[in-house]
Each structure stands twice: as C-alpha cells, then as structure tokens.
C-alpha cells in the first residue's frame, strides 16, 4: 500500500498536497484499490465555493459509486479534465496524474483536521 509521507489524508480516503494556499486533492491508493476499476469521475465546477466535508463529486467503478468530499473549505481552482476521457488514471497513478481537483484554501486551520501518513495507515489497518 502506497501512503506517501508528504501528504495529508482524510478518514474518507482523500489525500491532500499543499503548495502555498493551493491544495491538490485526490483519492488514496487504498481507496482506488477498494473501488477497483474506475470508469467515471464526476468533477466539481471551477469557481465553486465549498466547505470542509462538502460532497463535490463522485468516483464510479465497476463495483460501486463513492462520493468525493472536499477536505478543506475554499474555492475550486482547477479540475483534472483528463479524468473525463480516461478515469482509469486514478487506478494507475492516484497520487500524481490521478489528482481530481485543486482548491484555494479559505482557512489554513482546516489542515489541523487532516491525518498524517501514520494516522491514515492506522485507520486503514
């Protein structure tokens, strides 16, 4: 199981990478393994204001559909449109090419609610 140390995680199996006031969000390696073959991703809208914990999209696989939650409050700054044509990128590269959206942080304090790699590993063990 790949759980990079440099990322933050949620109990809903999203990962977060922070660069300044911009956070990149995707689903974890564990989540994509549980879902198996991803066949569709419903993306949020650029410019959409979201709160921490809001449902912003859906990942559908051959097994199930799973909601995507925003781990932080802010404004959706970018979406990974490549997933519309090839959602399986989430399976092959969940932490790099399979990112789902980027959000401009509203409150850096939201980061305090996220898990580090060790806590996330404990959660899924």
Image: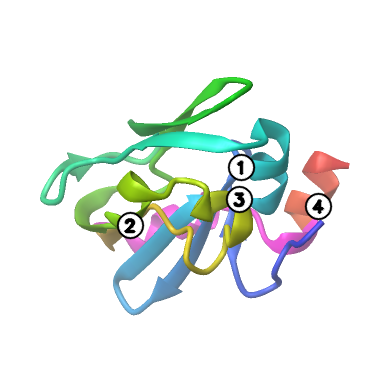
Q: Which mark is residue 47?
A: none
Q: Answer yes or no: do the residues labelled 2 and 1 have beta carbons within 8 Å?
A: no
> Which residue is tagged 3?
91
Residue 27 appears anywhere in the view? no
Q: Which residues are magenta?
A: 106-118
Furthest residue toward front = 85
Q: Which mark is residue 82?
A: 2
Residue 124 spot, x, y in % from top left: 80, 41
Element on which disc 2 rests:
helix
Q: What residue do we see at 48% from left, 34% from top?
A: 39
Element on which disc 4 rests:
helix
Q: Earlier in the sequence, mark 4 or mark 3?
A: 3
Q: Answer yes or no: do the residues labelled 4 and 2 have beta carbons within 8 Å?
A: no
Q: What residue do we see at 52% from left, 69% from top?
A: 96
Count the marks: how many?
Answer: 4
> Which residue is tagged 4?
121
Task: Decide: few, some or many residues near mark 4? Use Cα within 10 Å; few <14, some 14-19, many ≥20.
Answer: some
Q: CA distance from mark 2 to mark 1?
A: 21 Å
Q: Which mark is residue 13?
A: 1
Element on which disc 1 rests:
loop
Q: Earlier in the sequence, mark 4 or mark 2?
A: 2
Residue 94 appears anywhere in the view? yes
């Amino acid at each position: 199981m790949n759980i990079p140390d440099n990322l933050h995680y949620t109990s809903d199996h999203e990962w977060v990478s922070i660069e300044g006031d911009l956070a990149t969000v995707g689903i974890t390696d564990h989540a994509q393994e549980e879902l198996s073959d991803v066949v569709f991703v419903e993306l949020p809208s650029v410019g959409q204001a979201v709160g921490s914990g809001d449902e912003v999209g859906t990942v559908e696989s051959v097994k199930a559909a799973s909601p995507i939650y925003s781990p932080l409050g802010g404004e959706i700054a970018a979406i990974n449109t490549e997933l519309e044509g090839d959602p399986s990128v989430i399976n092959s590269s969940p932490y790099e090419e399979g990112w789902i959206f980027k959000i401009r942080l509203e409150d850096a304090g939201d980061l305090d609610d996220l898990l580090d790699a060790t806590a996330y590993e404990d959660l899924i063990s």
